[in-house]
Amino acid sequence: MKALGVTAKGNLKVLQAAAINVGLPIEEEQQKINEGWDGKPKGKLQVLWERGFIDNRDGAAFKKYTADGTKDEFKIVRPETSLNHLTSTCTDFVEEETMLQLMVRKMGMEVDRTPKCHAEMAGEGIEYVWA
């Protein structure tokens, strides 16, 4: 408003009236940006949505699903709202080979893996060799 030679002092209504008098808009339209999951790390919710297990048309899937599932009025967990349960139905996660297994298999050998951080289950693994 200074650039137009108008000096106005006062509350919001006085400033808005002065702006309207010189032809300045007092409201600004901004486009709503729906960020979504693009460029962000994926979690179970994203993976299940991509595979069609979750309907997110209303944008509120994060409210309907939890890691262990939401409870109904009788405090019983609903498995269809559990991300862990839905992910466990995707057998390809269990059967998927790691990059190491894939490369070793291509060389005609096999990799036998043990669970991470559980040396007691390793059997004859490196943990026993080190001991």
Image (cartoon, rainbow, N blue to C red):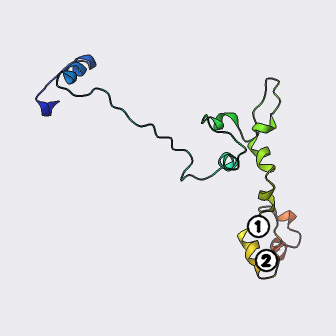
Query: Percent from the top left, x then y, of residue 69?
Result: 76, 37
| Closest to the observer, 101 or 89 | 89
Quadrant for residue 11, please give it: top left
Task: Please give left or right for residue 107 compared with residue 30 in the image.
Answer: right
The residue positioned farthest toward the left in the image shown? 5
Task: Please give left or right for residue 118 compared with residue 44 in the image.
Answer: right
Q: Amino acid at mark 2?
A: Arg
Quadrant for residue 64, please give it: top right
Quadrant for residue 123, please give it: bottom right
Q: Is residue 12 above or below residue 66?
A: above
Task: Please give left or right for residue 48 compared with residue 120 in the image.
Answer: left
Q: Is residue 44 above or below residue 105?
A: above
Residue of label 2: 105
| Closest to the observer, 112 or 44 | 44
Secondary structure of the residue carrying tag 2 is: helix
Residue of label 1: 97
Query: Percent from the top left, x then y, of residue 92?
Result: 78, 58
Q: Residues within 10 Å of mark 1 (few under 14, many from 20)?
A: few
* Residue depicted at x 46% and y 40%: 33
